[in-house]
Amino acid sequence: MGNVVAAAIAFVGTHFLLSHPLRAPLARRIGDKGFLGLYSLVALITLIWLALAYRAAPESTPLWPVGDILWAIGTILMLLAAILFMGSLVRNPALPEAKTDTVPEARGVFAITRHPMMWSFAIWGMVHILVFPDPANIVLALSIIILALLGARLQDRKKEALQPDFWREWERRTSFWPFAAVASGRAKIGKIGGHALGGGTVVWLAATWAHIPLSGWPAGIWRWIG
């Protein structure tokens, strides 16, 4: 477990160090391409370390019993996560390649949260803690949750500095927390979109089915089908 914790701290810590305080000085010293190469190498090494440490961790008794109710909750949440992820790939002003000066109306997954991709990763982590409460798995999933949600917060700060007028207006129309803008009347979900609903459903079905050959036990609706 100590190795899993150390690897998780290294994976998350180096990501934030290289993404924020160390990015500018390193880019000045080794150039943008050099920095990207260093960042990718460190991320790959720490990710491999975390994966190997997780696989080598001894089996432990689950911290709480997991029955059909928790599995049903997790299955629904994973569908939401898949829809958020697929919806985030289209017309997302937070993506690096997004070039627009016009602040869009928050619709679909962006009405739910302005960080649908990050929340999809966070929900993935929460669900995996919920249905597989093994200590090593909790450390792994928590690292993903922290990386996603703290990363989203830091992304807001960065965007506020780079695009103050655009991003502050986008923040006014949206919310960090899922459904908060909808609940306050600042956004309306409206049409989700086929790429989010259809694509998310396909990803959800495929990813949950993949647990059978990869881990040896069914997840999602496959627990009750076949």
Image (cartoon, rainbow, N blue to C red):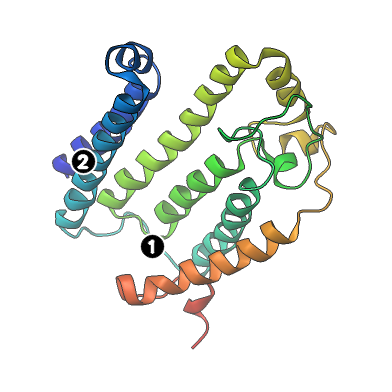
> Which of labels 2 and 1 is toward the front?
2
Provide the secondary structure element on which disc 1 rests: loop
Q: Which is more N-terminal, label 1 or label 2?
A: 2
Residue appearing at x 32%, y 16% in the figure: 22
Instruction: Give residue 21's position: percent from left, percent from top.
Output: 36, 14
Residue 60 or residue 128, whichever sits in front: 128
- Residue ID at (63%, 63%): 199
Measuring from the top left, give residue 178's x and y in whole percent.
66, 40
Neighbourhood count class around disc 2 (C-alpha, 10 Å): few under 14, some 14–19, many 20 upward? some
- Identified at 62% across, 66% down, the residue is 201
Q: Name the secondary structure under disc 2.
A: helix
**Horizontal and vertical percent for residue 43?**
29, 37
Q: Position of residue 85 (x, y in %)?
A: 58, 51
Q: Examine the rendered structure and indicate whether residue 163 appears above or below residue 54.
A: above
Callouts 2 and 1 close, C-beta under 8 Å: no
Q: Which residue is mark 1?
A: 65
Q: On the picture, is 104 further left or further right than 213?
A: right
Q: Amino acid at mark 1?
A: Pro
> Which residue is label 2 attached to?
45
**Residue 20 in view of the camera:** yes
Q: Amino acid at mark 2?
A: Ile
